[in-house]
Image (cartoon, rainbow, N blue to C red):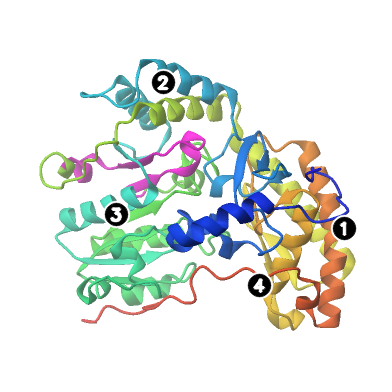
């Protein structure tokens, strides 16, 4: 019998997953379309590799094993799998068609909705992915300012201008690599030291997990304004999750441009670019940003239904409530066990569990892998995050905390023995990037 969501006696059987993976090794480079979903991010030999279906907060892999899911498709499922109102909207639109030869009314209807709820969304454009719209925002900024350089903080997608600052930058011309630089979050001086008269834009995630300190975002807004540099909020994670209107609403700060994806359509592919009308007006004639599937109607129908449900059910408040219980509960368990090398932190709606190698004397990735392994055995698909959805019930949260109470003593024993590997049944997870380059580097002409 496949494992279910319970304290199972053994680890899940993943035979079909492994059979599919063996084929993928031959046909698909890196075996995955999304790095965070791939085998390098899950402990080999224990974690399932392929999911078959989902409902609410639960998923079933190709071998029939059931899990509570805290990855939630790496963020898009703000409401949950197969959410009825969204799926019904998709089915209704499917009866009429998917992509058309002319524009579709949903392009206007969704734009009107976003204009009402997202601060400074004076103009709205669509595409299919987050990387699409962050790259469009950078191009717009360069066109509007007549400048070339970009300062970034966080993760912004796979396109040349951003990936040039990582160690996966093969294939990107050096002339492009020399135009993007990074600065430190919560370090306004690192921005001041880097910004100059050729800086077109500053793009950042308003927060990842760390809270802004000492009015960091307000100061960042001020520095950009004084330098004539556009400020872009990459709201892939914050948009429609920390608040309906995203970080701009939550912190009371207006960016010049803001980009959204993930939570806005509950799993359907859409990217949204919003911003000042004078900047966005360059998309009329001067800046080219058009795609065949930008007005695809199923995703727009899903976005409209999702946004309406987020508003009607006050979903951000619910995400915060459930996420807080998980964060506080995890930290209480760790404190009771006297282990100070692991903690859960972040904003209520999305938290991360960290492992301190210096305090523990052990490899943090091995520690994470052990916890992941044991959570999977107990029916929880876990990657070190709590990406909360509206479908995560009180029962889900209560069960998860019971699992942590069972698993963290295992981690404690492994750390005390200084031998995590002894407890692992497979290879540990790997880092996404080994390093980033150009970090906190001043532009060359300063």
Asked if 124 appears above or below 341 in the picture, the reply is above
134 left or right of 32 in image: left
For label 4, the residue is 365
Q: Determine the residue positioned at 53% across, 40% down.
A: 243
Secondary structure found at label 4: helix
Expressed as whole percent of the image width and height from the top left, the position of residue 342 reads 74, 68
Q: Marks 2 and 3: which is nearer the front?
A: 2
Expressed as whole percent of the image width and height from the top left, the position of residue 114 reads 39, 32
For label 1, the residue is 406
Q: Determine the residue positioned at 21% across, 23% down.
A: 102
Expressed as whole percent of the image width and height from the top left, the position of residue 258 reads 36, 47
Tag of residue 94: 2
Secondary structure found at label 1: helix
**Residues rendered magenta in the picture:** 255-281
Real-space Cα separation, disc 2 to disc 3, in angstroms: 30 Å
* Residue 125 lies in the magenta stretch: no
324 left or right of 274 in image: right
Real-space Cα separation, disc 1 to disc 3, in angstroms: 44 Å
Real-space Cα separation, disc 1 to disc 2, in angstroms: 46 Å
Of residues 54 and 158, the one drawn nearer to the viewer in this rendering: 54
Expressed as whole percent of the image width and height from the top left, the position of residue 241 reads 54, 42
Asked if marks 1 and 3 touch (Cβ < 8 Å), the reply is no
For label 3, the residue is 135
- Which sits earlier in the primary sequence, circle 3 or circle 4? 3
Of residues 151 and 23, the one drawn nearer to the viewer in this rendering: 23
Image quadrant occupied by the C terminus: bottom left
Asked if marks 3 and 4 touch (Cβ < 8 Å), the reply is no
Say how many tags the image has.
4
Dot 3, how many residues are within 10 Å of its Cα: few (below 14), some (14-19), or many (20+)?
A: many
């Amino acid at each position: 019998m496949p494992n279910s969501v319970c304290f199972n006696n053994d680890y899940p059987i993943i035979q079909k997953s492994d059979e599919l993976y063996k084929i993928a090794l031959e046909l698909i480079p890196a075996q995955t379309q999304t790095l965070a979903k791939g085998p390098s991010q899950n402990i080999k030999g224990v974690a399932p590799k392929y999911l078959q279906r989902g409902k609410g907060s639960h998923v079933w892999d190709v071998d029939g094993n059931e899990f509570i899911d805290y990855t939630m498709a790496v963020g898009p499922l703000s409401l949950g799998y197969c959410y009825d109102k969204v799926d019904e909207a998709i089915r209704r639109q499917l009866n009429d068609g998917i992509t058309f030869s002319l524009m579709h009314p949903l392009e206007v209807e969704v734009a009107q909705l976003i204009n009402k709820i997202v601060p400074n969304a004076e103009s709205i454009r669509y595409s299919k992915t987050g990387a699409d719209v962050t790259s469009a925002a950078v191009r717009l900024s360069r066109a509007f300012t007549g400048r070339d350089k970009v300062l970034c903080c966080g993760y912004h997608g796979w396109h040349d201008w951003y990936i040039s600052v990582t160690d996966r930058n093969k294939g990107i011309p050096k002339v492009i690599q020399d135009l993007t630089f990074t600065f430190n979050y919560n370090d306004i001086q690192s921005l001041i030291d880097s910004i100059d008269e050729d800086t077109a834009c500053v793009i950042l995630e308003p927060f990842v997990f760390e809270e802004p300190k000492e009015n960091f975002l307000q100061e960042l807004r001020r520095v950009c304004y004084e330098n004539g540099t556009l400020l872009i909020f990459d709201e892939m994670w914050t948009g429609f999750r920390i608040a309906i209107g995203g970080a701009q609403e939550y912190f009371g700060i207006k960016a010049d441009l803001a980009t959204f994806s993930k939570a806005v359509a509950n799993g359907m592919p859409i990217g949204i670019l919003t911003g000042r009308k004078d900047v966005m007006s360059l998309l009329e004639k001067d800046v080219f940003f058009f795609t065949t599937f930008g007005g695809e109607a199923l995703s727009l129908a899903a976005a409209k239904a999702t946004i309406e449900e987020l508003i009607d059910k006050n979903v951000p408040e619910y995400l915060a409530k459930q996420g807080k219980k998980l964060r506080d509960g995890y930290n209480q368990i760790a404190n009771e066990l006297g282990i100070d090398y692991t903690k859960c932190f972040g904003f209520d709606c999305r938290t991360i569990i960290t492992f301190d190698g210096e305090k523990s004397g052990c490899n943090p990735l091995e520690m994470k892998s052990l916890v992941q392994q044991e959570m999977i055995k107990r029916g929880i698909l876990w990657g070190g995050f709590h990406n909360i959805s509206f479908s995560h019930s009180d029962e889900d949260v209560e069960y998860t905390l019971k699992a942590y109470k069972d698993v963290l003593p295992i981690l404690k024993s492994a750390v005390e023995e200084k031998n995590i590997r002894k407890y692992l049944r497979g290879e540990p997870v790997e880092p996404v990037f080994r390093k980033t380059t150009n970090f906190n580097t001043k532009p060359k002409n300063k």
